Image (cartoon, rainbow, N blue to C red):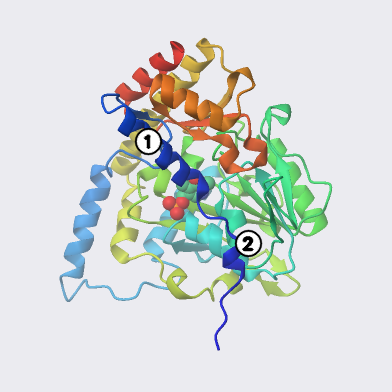
Amino acid sequence: MFKINENYMKLPGSYLFSTIGKKVKEFTEANPDSKIIRLGIGDVTLPLAPAVITALHKGVDDMANKETFKGYAPDLGYDFLRQLIAEHDFKSRGVTIATDEIFISDGAKSDSSNIQEIFDVSNKIAVCDPVYPVYVDSNVMAGRTGEYLVDTGKWTNVIYMPCTKENDFAPELPTEVPDLIYLCFPNNPTGSTITKDALQKWVDYANKVGAVIIYDAAYEAYISEDNVPHTIYECEGAKTCAIEIRSFSKNAGFTGTRLGFTVIPKELKCGDVLLNSLWARRHGTKFNGAPYITQLAGAAVYTEEGKKQTREQIAYYMNNAKVIREGLIAAGYSVSGGVNAPYIWLETPKGMTSWEFFDHLLNKANVVGTPGSGFGPSGEGYFRLTAFGTYENTLEAIERIKRL
Ligand SMILES: *Cc1c(COP(=O)(O)O)cnc(C)c1O
């Protein structure tokens, strides 16, 4: 008689976005003439760059010819793409990453969720609070956490590292020693970053206590300040303690196309065992995770044209971020993020809870955002707005918020 994985039953489900959907639906039904503006979008909205589209067409044509047809992709992904990544994402930053340390995948969500499988179930994880929910959820399903406590909004057996205004939204080294440390910079949802010196402290700490850092750099392309590292391997000693996860989703619009990669340096070992060789055994859809056509499209992102076109997209979003950030500051809000990330994180005014502010913004300004408490207990009292809307709507939304 089969048994289910009981750990799946522990997950409370996606309460955040279903509640937002329900509230917006109710409001629209009651106010059919109001024009709702969504500044809660966590997905890109501009179409794929022309260079990427051209590559996708070529990929389709290649699949139509006997001479150029492709079956299963190589285990780690196509060499042409891994070479471009090694060159443009790492060598250009003074970091040497070998092509066989790069594993192409169908995206950072899958990788950041699956990477925990190469670690023992007894490992203790540490996560930033608030943060992208995938890290905790995947460890819940794997049985690495205890129970969810409704009153605290926390899982037992997880080390939470609060990121609040008090520490400028950058976590402090934990007092309890973790085995796996999830870091995400620039951060979703707070839009905060970490300086190279501050990240170096984490690398030194992980090497000292024998922990592995899983570094999610999905928003690397949004970094605008010089002292913010683009890759954790800019830090001395990171190759012996860090795995880095990247995505083509937010820098090049691949959220619906699916492409990402994970870097596992060969120096990263547990005894004699290379984590690189463990990840090479990953299974299922994780194996050959991205089609040839998609990998060809990814390569186009690194062409001169592709770079220019994707940079323009990021500039468009970041101009929206500037409108939101500066508008909120002018309206007297306490704001962070929006400089190295498409996310603006604001403190809710007048002691409102995250959900009270959500209702206030929806009812009074007809603007939809995301309550900070949905990303972790330390997100209570904060609110996330995103730069993925249109410029015109963003301007209008901010004008409405200013008039509140
Ligand atoms: C959007 C996002 C990703 C990207 O995931 P994909 O699966 O590559 O689309 C990864 N990490 C964070 C923190 C994100 O917000």
Question: Toward which corner of the image does residue 337 lie, by quadrant?
Answer: top right
Residue at image coords 73%, 75%: 272
Q: Which x, y percent locates residue 390?
A: 31, 28
- Can you see residue 248? yes
Callout 2: few (<14), some (14-19), or many (20+) C-alpha neighbours within 10 Å?
A: many
Identify the element where label 2 is drawn: helix
Looking at the image, which is closer to me, 76 or 257? 257
Looking at the image, which is closer to me, 391 or 236? 391
- Can you see residue 265? no
Residue at image coords 33%, 52%: 256
Identify the element where label 1 is drawn: helix
Give above or below for 202 relative to 170.
below
Looking at the image, which is closer to me, 9 or 116? 9
Callout 1: few (<14), some (14-19), or many (20+) C-alpha neighbours within 10 Å?
A: few
Instruction: Identify the residue position indicated by label 1 in the image.
Output: 26
Q: Which x, y percent locates residue 61?
A: 16, 64
Q: Is residue 261 left or right of residue 353?
A: left
Give above or below for 377 relative to 337.
below
Q: Amino acid at mark 1?
A: Glu
Residue at image coords 45%, 39%: 20
Residue at image coords 69%, 61%: 145
Q: Is residue 328 left or right of residue 164?
A: left
Q: Which x, y percent locates residue 355?
A: 55, 32
- Whether the residue under disc 2 has CB within 8 Å of ligand 1: no
Give above or below for 385 relative to 398.
below
Instruction: Identify the residue position indicated by label 2 in the image.
Output: 139
Give above or below for 108 relative to 172.
below
Q: Amino acid at mark 2?
A: Asn
- Mark 1 or 2 closer to N-term? 1
